Image (spheres, grey):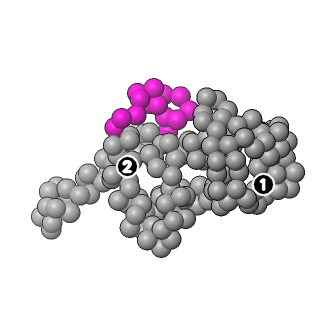
Amino acid sequence: MLIGCGILIGVMAGGGGIVTTDLASDVTASATQLHVLTTTDFLEEDYLIIGSEKIFYTATNATYFLGCTRGYDDTDAAEHEAGARVYTEFSSTINYAVGFNMAAVQDEMGWATVFAIPIMFFVRTIPHIIKMSTNLLTGELAIISWFFYAMAAGFVVTLALTLIGSRRVF
């Protein structure tokens, strides 16, 4: 699990084809331009996610998203502070699948993430997976939910074998 979460944190931090950046300055809820560290690898026109807000943009330059429509897709426009992580849709999908923002946990906790991610997995991810709608078992997100079901089953078996100790069950 630690390796898997480490890979997912790397993906959320910008590796693996998922694009992220950080706000370079504070943003008001009505701002139509977002100043970020870089727009490299973002599409010329798309939407992005900051916190729980979706923002549609119509153009980019090296460090700005331009022509922003705030509160896109019935989300609430909100103020955001400099340093807030800016995500593409795909990184938000991973956060939804695990039930918490792994990159934010890693950013805030640093090396303590080694302990925090496993705890968050049991406290947040497993209950979140149990609550997931059955329509996630089909379609594009099916692989994510099946992966976590298999991982949860593996943890239960590993925990049971650990509690049994050195006794041979098989």
Residue 77 place in picture, x, y as percent: 64, 38
In percent of width and height, residue 53 lies at: 61, 40
Residue 48 position (above or below residue 160): above
Q: Is residue 162 left or right of residue 135?
A: left
Above/below status of 110 relative to 73: below
User: Where does label 1 land, which residue?
Assistant: 35
Q: Please give the count of numbered marks on the rendered protein.
A: 2
Q: Say if 144 sits above or below 139 in the image.
A: below
- Neighbor class of circle 2 (other Cα within 10 Å; few <14, some 14-19, many 20+) is some
The residue drawn where x is 82% and y is 51% is 64
Name the residue nearer the viewer: 161 or 129.
129
**Is residue 47 rendered magenta in the image?**
no
Q: Are marks 1 and 2 in contact (CB under 8 Å)?
A: no
**Label 1, label 2: how many angstroms apart (C-alpha)?**
32 Å
Q: Nearer the viewer, residue 19 or 36?
A: 36
Image position, residue 134 (x, y; %): 40, 27
| Magenta-tinted stretch | 130-144
Q: Amino acid at mark 2?
A: Arg
Please say whether residue 140 is one of the residues in the magenta stretch.
Answer: yes
Q: Quadrant of residue 165?
A: bottom left
Give the residue at x 33% y 53%: 122
Disc ID at residue 124: 2
Residue at horizontal 25%, vertical 52%? 157
Image point (55%, 65%), residue name? 107
